Structures are given as C-alpha cells and as structure tokens.
Amino acid sequence: MPKSIGDIKNSLDCQLGNRIVLKANGGRKKTIERCGVLTETYPSVFVVELDPEKHNFERVSYTYADVLTENVKVSFVEDELQQEVIAH
C-alpha cells in the first residue's frame, strides 16, 4: 500500500480512464460501494464519473487522504477481473 499522498496520486494518475470500484466508510458499520470511471485527478482530490444505471448522481470526489487513512478503498476493474491496487 502506498505510504504517502503523493504515491497515491501517482498510482491514480496512471489509471485515468479506467473502471474503478470504491468502497467508502458510510459510518455506523455501513459500507458504500460505487462503480464508475476515474476521470480526473487534482492536487488534493480525484473525481469518479459514476455508472448512471446504478447511481442517482453523476460523479463523486474523494481526497487522497481518504485513501491513505483507509476510509476509502480503491480497486480497478480490468477485463471482468477486479484488481486491488490501493487497498488492504
């Protein structure tokens, strides 16, 4: 697992345009899973455009600190196989 925010950003920069699965901590032992495409990375956040048939809104953004503190787990989907890149 990357040890710094810079490492996480670099890992995500290499995956721009790829399908992504996010598992976010929703509080009170609740996990939220979202699927989409990694569309943009900025100095502090990354943006995922969500699948319209599965979600009520178009896009979501998270900070790299969310990934570092494991509030959000990121995995990429390649050819129907889910590959964890930044996760436990």
Image (cartoon, helix red, strand yellow):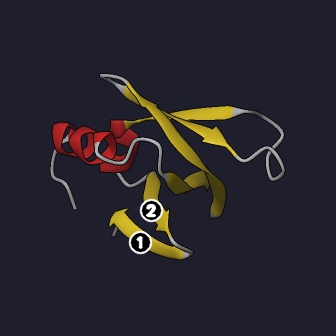
Kindly indicate the quadrant of the structure image that contains residue 83. bottom left
Task: Give residue 4's position: percent from left, percent from top.
Answer: 16, 44
| Figure quadrant of residue 56 | top right
- The residue that appears at 36% across and 48% down in the rendered structure is 15
| Amino acid type of the residue that numbered disc 2 sits on in the rendered structure | Ser
Q: Position of residue 32 (x, y in %)?
A: 66, 56
Amino acid at the residue labelled 1:
Gln
Mark yes or no: residue 53 visible.
Answer: yes
The kind of secondary structure element at disc 2 is strand
Q: Quadrant of the N terminus?
A: bottom left
- Numbered circle sitting on residue 27: none
At horizontal 66% and vertical 61% (from top left) the residue drawn is: 30
Q: Residues within 10 Å of mark 1 (few under 14, many from 20)?
A: some
Q: Which residue is mark 2?
A: 75
Q: Nearer the viewer, residue 19 or 44?
A: 19
**Nearest the eye: 35 or 26:** 35
- Disc nearer the start of the sequence (2/1): 2
Q: Quadrant of the C terminus?
A: bottom left
Q: Is residue 28 visible?
A: no
Residue 48 coordinates in the image, percent (x, y)? 55, 38
Residue placed farthest to the front in the image? 79
Q: Does residue 27 appear to the left or right of 14 in the view shown? A: right
Q: Residue at x 63, y 64 (%)?
A: 29
The secondary element bearing badge 1 is classed as: strand
Q: Which mark is residue 83?
A: 1
Using residue 69 as the reference point, say whether residue 57 is left or right of it. Answer: right
**CA distance separating discs 2 and 1:** 6 Å
Determine contact: label 2, label 1, CB under 8 Å. Answer: yes
